[in-house]
Image (cartoon, helix red, strand yellow):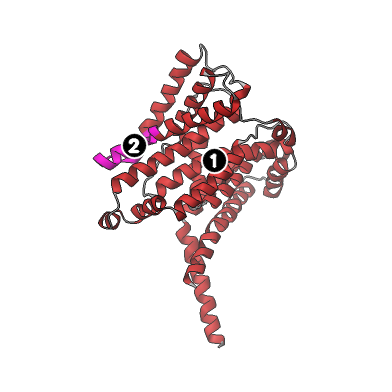
Amino acid sequence: MKVSRSKLDNLLVPIFSIILGFVFGAILMLFFGYNPITAYEAMIMGVFGSPYFLGEALRQATILTFTGLGFAIAFKAGFFNIGVSGQLLAGWVSAIWVALAFPDLPRLVLVPLSIGAGVLFGAIWAGIAGFLRAYFGTSEVIVTIMLNFTALHTTNYIIRNILAVGNTTERISENASLRVGWLTDLTAGSRLNMGFFIAIVVVILYWIFMTHMTAGFEIRAVGLNPFASTYAGMSAKKNIILSMVISGALAGLGGAIHGMGTFGNLFTQNALPNIGFNGIAVALLGLGNPIGIFFSSILFGVLDVGAGFMPNRAGVPDEMASIVIAAIIFFVGANYLIRLVLNKVSTNKAVQNEGGE
């Protein structure tokens, strides 16, 4: 009974967080004289009323799934990998570099090769922080923040001095592209690509790894109690590095798909990609569960794309969508309050039932 109650609470916490986030946004809109019903209707109908914008929302959700899973596995091991954006960039630049270097290779060879490069360099980039944490006890937060900016400026240098003369690279060949005609036609020309289906496969593999494999169990055990895990014969150092490597590999995979599917090239960045940081929010909303992360990614994709309809159709600034997202994250972070309310409601019901008997 306790297990089922715990599972129910884990399901209700993100649901109530989303509801409270939208309610908070509505109150704020009312305070400033906007109509929240019109605003939310414009957001939702703008996305779901158009195959193109629905495709764009799912395309956004695809990358958020990878960055969310990347953050989640490190978090399960007890680490806060704030370097997801840098690892995504490492995967993006390496995948595009390989794709441009071998444009005439067959598609069945070039696509896996380019994606593999993105996964490898994303893993290496995060592995640096994991190694320093495991053997020298350095803060992974500080190291990954510094690696974020290293990745940003290194990427811009590579674009300007190696891959291109200006601020953008050439487009990759059709043999390296993840776009497929039937999917583009189905979504009225959106940039939704095969990465969406790769994301679904990765979600399933992630769940199998974390719940049915020894390595996944050890990562979770180290995250819960590193001292007890070491006493039980598990290598804390190995699992620290492994969790960070897998985390970076997933972020790098997202970067590779972002480059090969969404854009088809690489361009200089003025700042770190927000999609990396939003992946952290997605992981927190999904409570580290891969299925939860996948659906949280879709929600964030809809909010992000739908925000563009709020100014024109409802006269509401699109920043309001960002406030709703921030409020949702706040309530996820303050989930102990939601759990407290749920426990009190459950206790009151139990008392009433006993009184009735």
Q: Residue 150 carries which label?
A: none
Can you give x and y, in whole percent of width and height, for residue 213 in the image?
A: 43, 53
Point out the stretch of residues depicted in magenta. Answer: 124-145
Name the residue rendered at 54%, 42% in the picture. Answer: 65
> Secondary structure of the magenta portion, mostly?
helix
Is residue 42 within the magenta segment?
no
Q: In this view, does 159 lie above or below 186?
A: above
The residue to which callout 1 is attached is: 64
The mark nearer the N terminus, 1 or 2, is 1
User: What is the three-letter code of the residue carrying label 1?
Assistant: Leu
Can you give x and y, in whole percent of width and height, for residue 113 in the image?
A: 51, 28
* Quarter-of-image position of residue 42: top right
Quick check: can you spot residue 352?
A: yes
Left or right: 267 as drawn, with respect to 213: right
The residue to which callout 2 is attached is: 129
Depth check: 194 or 293 in front? 194
Name the residue rendered at 52%, 51% in the picture. Answer: 286
Left or right: 50 as drawn, with respect to 163: right
Q: Distance between the residues labelled 1 and 2?
A: 22 Å
Depth check: 210 or 13 in front? 210
* Quarter-of-image position of residue 109: top right
Helix or strand or loop: what does disc 2 sit on?
helix
Quick check: can you spot residue 304?
A: no
